[in-house]
Amino acid sequence: MAERDEEAGRAIRAHHEELLEGVRAKTAALAGTAAAGEAFDHPRAELIAYLAGEVLPHAAAEEGTIYRAVAAGLTETVDAMVAEHRLLEAKAEALASVEDPQACATLACEFSDLFARHVADENDVLLPALLRSDTTSLADVLGDMARAFSAAKAGPGSPHGAEAVLSVALSDALVGLARAGGGDEACRQAAATWSQVRHDHPRLAVALTALLHRLARFQPHDPGPEHEMQVVGGDDPALDVRRLAPAQRHQLIFTTWSALAPAAAFVLVNDHDPKPLRYQFAAEHPDEFSWDYLEAGPKVWKVRIGRTPTSAVA
């Protein structure tokens, strides 16, 4: 076994430990604020930025290098570990949409525990297999992985470095504005920023959607004049998103609206007030959509969302 391959194995294990320590520390900070009943947006933003800027790019780099190098001999193991990557991505995305502090902390702990088991399997199964290989140099694989990791961190949708710092700073500033009585303006600013970044930086957009949900809670529900609550959906199709993961809901709703003809509508059925979505519509499609509450909770919310007669269809 070449010394340079052994050094490469130690370097990969050290990076794994660094990532695991980072996840555990940020998860503990989030869990601590949730347990104390304090605002958890800042530690959540810190954790999401770390996962999106470090952990998930590392996972993407592994799939194209380490996993590919051992796939022939450990097909089932590699397939299972790729599936765990997808599960880690789903949990990281869901962190941005969970509104309850304790539920968010629980999800963060689940991510941390799964990542710890995942890293242990990589250290104990994949790396020894590569070190035993007569045809593959772990040092060469590490070099490829380092380049892939850098590319993944710099790629679209990766809130790394300055972007992560700005994301956290924006969250703190807008929550402060909302606490000072500027909830509506804070929501408008968050939605406007979401509209600007959602195509090129989808992970940042997910974090901003979560921030919008937090900001909206500073405002009481206001469905508008009483007659709006009496609007009848008629033959408008219903879109029930209650069983979907939070991260999937907004995209499906916008896709459904985009397919509408002018003056057409659908009835959104949700398990909470979709007020944050209204701010996003206002940012993306001002004067092109209609919004009428049909039912306003407490368990079921129904909103008739339509295109205005003069709305342009792409």
Image (tube, grey):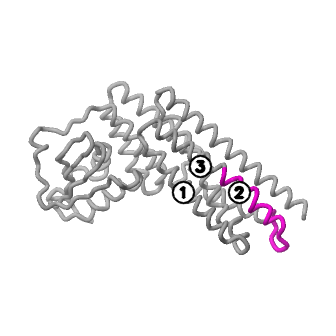
Q: Tell me whether the residue at label 1 lies in contact with that at label 3, contact meaning CB atoms closer than 8 angstroms.
A: no
Q: Is residue 139 above or below residue 88?
A: below
Identity of the residue drawn at 80% across and 71% down: 136
Residue 194 appears at what percent x and percent y?
40, 48
Circle 3 SS class: helix
In the picture, the quarter occupied by the N terminus is bottom right
* Identity, as a three-letter code, of the amino acid under mark 1: Leu
Whether residue 84 sits left or right of residue 137 in the image: it is: left
In the picture, the quarter occupied by the C terminus is bottom left
In the figure, residue 264 lies in which quadrant?
bottom left
Circle 1 SS class: helix
First reached walking from the N terminus: tag 3 or tag 2: 3
Nearer to the camera, 234 or 254: 234
| Boundaries of the magenta span | 117-139
Whether residue 201 sits left or right of residue 9 in the image: it is: left
As measured in the structure, the alpha-carbon distance from the residue carrying label 2 to the one carrying label 1 is 16 Å
Circle 2 SS class: helix
